[in-house]
Image: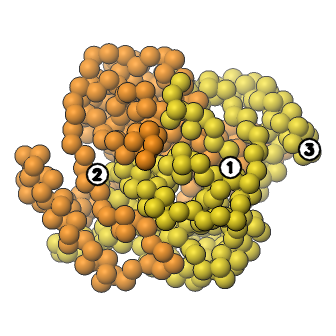
Chain colours: A yellow, B orange
Amino acid sequence: MNSTIDVLRSHRSIRQFRDEPVLPEHIREAVRAGQAASTSSAIQAYCALQVTDPTKRARLVELTGGQPYVAQAGAFFAICADTRRLKIACESTGQTYDQHLEGFVLGVIDATMFAQNMVIAFESLGYGICYIGGLRNNLPVVDELLKIPDGVYPLFGLCVGVPDQQPTHRPRMDVDAALYVDSFPSDEELQNSLHRYDEVYTDYLVARGAQARSWSQVMSRKLGKPMRPDLASYYTSKGARLD
Amino acid sequence: MNSTIDVLRSHRSIRQFRDEPVLPEHIREAVRAGQAASTSSAIQAYCALQVTDPTKRARLVELTGGQPYVAQAGAFFAICADTRRLKIACESTGQTYDQHLEGFVLGVIDATMFAQNMVIAFESLGYGICYIGGLRNNLPVVDELLKIPDGVYPLFGLCVGVPDQQPTHRPRMDVDAALYVDSFPSDEELQNSLHRYDEVYTDYLVARGAQARSWSQVMSRKLGKPMRPDLASYYTSKGARLD
């Protein structure tokens, strides 16, 4: 429809990068684009910590589940919700910053919009990216490694670099599975709508040489047991309130 | 730097719209662009509920803090984290979907990336947008109005339409306030870095005809008291675990 939508639609996660840097001016341009995203009442409750130290990057590979591109990508960032400035601002006028769950949710949303704009800027410049949810695998150790201050909540990693692969697109559900008009489908309608996508997803995995599994089977294997059960205790240890 | 970055950088929230619709094919194209965003292991834990009923839109104006554009915009969406399909998928193979905080965080991040891509697609097509965090002002009543199912967590609203204003850009912090390399600033460095931005922000408000206040003063007035303290009890009532 237009070149920006082409950039959005052509996204695939890149997990193999050439041994080439991400230009510093491109990083600053992407961060500026990130900062241009909406931010609730200008709170700007985010930061990107770029990790350049090879020893730390190697350690992060282990901590995020053995994903080698965390070390190999031209650049790696830890994207964080960051409430430190908000606390400073409140205290500078004699107030206390003491937000319940809303403070955490604000930060997660703010930081994610910031990161997604960074990603689109990087992709428009020809780079490839991969988000690393595995950053949440072992946050207490990541915390020590990166010396995370109180009030900062690491959310996910972001690998950026010059792509050295051209993966196929992972198929998404139909538009009608993401857009509802005026009412939500019933459980039964939802269940029925999954059958076709389950087939499409199986075909995609088979075409990639992976084991034949439906989307429902993949989800069930991944989400059928509690994931990262210690997340709440980590974030509250950094000052977040989840109540 | 390129036309996509121009789209990202030229964002401002639009709060006055012409009485013109958002074309249905543009809505579907934007949702498709949203679906093309990264999604953790393809969970696609999101949905957009478009609200077209004028009575509901009028009620949403009240519920979100009296923002008239919630009714006037060409289109309005409630953006939700949506775990219903994940539960169905797990149960279809005899597993239980029972995630701690991680499940909620996954959904918030997934839905926000989806929404931000939608926003960029809409803006690239010439529309203006405004996110409505006020959707979280009174979620139990929004829940009844929109008949939100269990497992769906409304996060924010999204107004889209043909702009009828050209607001100035709200200045952001410097790049160095959002991008750190290998270490975080100390509290003192952070505090010192705010002074310049406080002045820039005051100038911006004065130029808009608003009362002279620094960013720190604005933050303190907004965040110096607990916001939306009932958020956790609402989300847990819908099935989210925050522990």
The structure residue drawn at horizontal position 50% and vertical position 35%, both measured from the top left corner, is A4
Residue A38 x %, y %: 36, 47
Q: What residue type is disc 3 on?
A: Gly
Residue at (55, 66) in percent of width and height? A77
Q: Do marks 2 and 3 share a chain?
A: yes
Residue that carries the numbered disc 3 in the rendered image = A209
Q: Residues within 10 Å of mark 1 (few under 14, many from 20)?
A: many
Where residue B109 appears, x then y in whole percent? 55, 51
Residue tagged 2 = A41
Spatial CA distance of label 1 from label 2 is: 31 Å
Tag 3, which chain?
Answer: A
Q: Residue at x 25, y 78 (%)?
A: B192
Left or right, A222 with respect to A130, comes to: right
The residue nearer to you, when weighing A69 against A192, is: A69
Q: Nearer the viewer, residue A24 or B179?
A: A24
Taking the image as shown, residue B143 lies to the left or right of residue A184, namely: left
Using the image, determine if residue B148 lies above or below residue A28: above
Q: Nearer the viewer, residue A90 or A60?
A: A60
Label 2 marks which chain's residue? Answer: A
Query: Is the residue under label 2 in contact with that under label 1 (CB below 8 Å)?
Result: no
Q: Amino acid at mark 1?
A: Ser
Q: Chain of mark 1?
A: A
Question: What is the number of the mark on residue B77?
Answer: none
The circle drawn on residue A13 is: 1
Of callouts 2 and 3, the N-terminal one: 2
Residue B227 % position (x, y) = 31, 56
Q: Position of residue A59 (x, y in %)?
A: 69, 79
> Disc 2 versus disc 3: distance between alpha carbons?
48 Å
Question: Gap between marks 1 and 3, in whole Å?
Answer: 18 Å
